[in-house]
Amino acid sequence: MEWTIVGAGAIGCLWGASLQQAGFGVTLVLRDATRLQQFRRAGGIRLTREGNESLHRVKATLAGDCGPIERLLLCTKAFDTEAALRAVLPRLTPNARVLVLQNGLGNQQLAGELVGPWRLAIGSTTDGAWLRAPFEVVHAGRGQTRIGASDADSSDLVAELPDDFSLEVCSDPDIETTLWRKLAVNCAINPLTAIHACRNGDLVRIARYREELIRLCDEFELVARARGTQLFDRPLAEQAQNVAAATGDNFSSMLQDIRHRRTTEIEQITGYLCREAERLGIAVPTHRAMLEQVRKLEATQHRRDSNHG
């Protein structure tokens, strides 16, 4: 079985190396010729896991040169979902399956509309990974990837993976709740760290930041209750603080995006929550403030880039 991966960030590279190690054919679809040249210089995906380094010689191509796709893994930023899928849509075989492994909410529904809901599987991962350099991925924290689907059976995808697959993967009959749980923690941690330019652990250590986190969690729980979504067996504020403490030395992906002057996923994370709250008639003023502040940070960075252009 051949896997095609669109989105060669940390998670895409982690999965690419792990699938190749398990004996699957793997092809990365890269966005432009510059990235393809970078990949050729790298010689493949270099994976560091538990202190051991390995080189995985997967293939790489551009969307226009891509062959037939049997299994597609989409790991792009959430805002790139439509463009990324449209580029490879003509290459999907009749029995192709598409696994979406992204942050945020809303993009999964869009993916289903584009590829057909019967093809779609949805994933949520707690694996920790970061890129040391392009195509050099560090598997920093072992987690779990849960795979489910609303209109298809995802168990066949999980069953295709060998028992000794190096990532922990399981089927999830209620993937929507899993996605909402991840959204809850991301809404609490990511915008705050981006705005305050701090590590995750500072949200617990610094009283003012901790108070903001608790307000965000309280507002999120109002929306979850109105939807009938069961989050955790403890208050969200406690769960979010536990995650922030456990990943205390980490810089969130949203903060890294701001620092590298990249577009963030704020619209698919906090923006999605605010839209859902508005639909339900629930006030979430702290989340709305976070949304506006991150938008301003992005706009400031883009203006700087324009001025230096």
Image: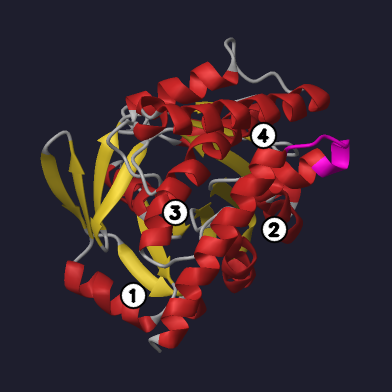
The structure residue drawn at horizontal position 57% and vertical position 67%, both measured from the top left corner, is 84
The structure residue drawn at horizontal position 56% and vertical position 63%, both measured from the top left corner, is 296
Residue 39 in the image, given as x and y percentages of width and height = 26, 70
For marks 1 and 3, the one nearer the N-term is 3
For marks 2 and 3, the one nearer the N-term is 3
For marks 1 and 2, the one nearer the N-term is 1
Q: Quadrant of the C terminus?
A: bottom left
Q: Nearer the viewer, mark 1 or mark 2?
A: 1
Mark 1, residue position: 35
Give the extent of the magenta segment. 278-284
Distance (Cα) linking label 1 and label 4 = 34 Å
Mark 2, residue position: 115
Circle 1 residues within 10 Å: few <14, some 14–19, many ≥20? some
Mark 2 in CB contact with mark 4 (< 8 angstroms): no
Quadrant of the image occupied by residue 229: top right
Amino acid type of the residue that numbered disc 4 sits on in the rendered structure: Asp
**Dot 2 lies on which element?**
helix
In this view, 187 is above or below 296: above
**Dot 3 lies on which element?**
strand
Mark 3, residue position: 3
Distance (Cα) linking label 2 and label 4 = 15 Å
Q: Which is more toward the observer, 246 or 168?
A: 246
**Dot 4 lies on which element?**
loop
Numbered mark located on residue 153 in the image? 4
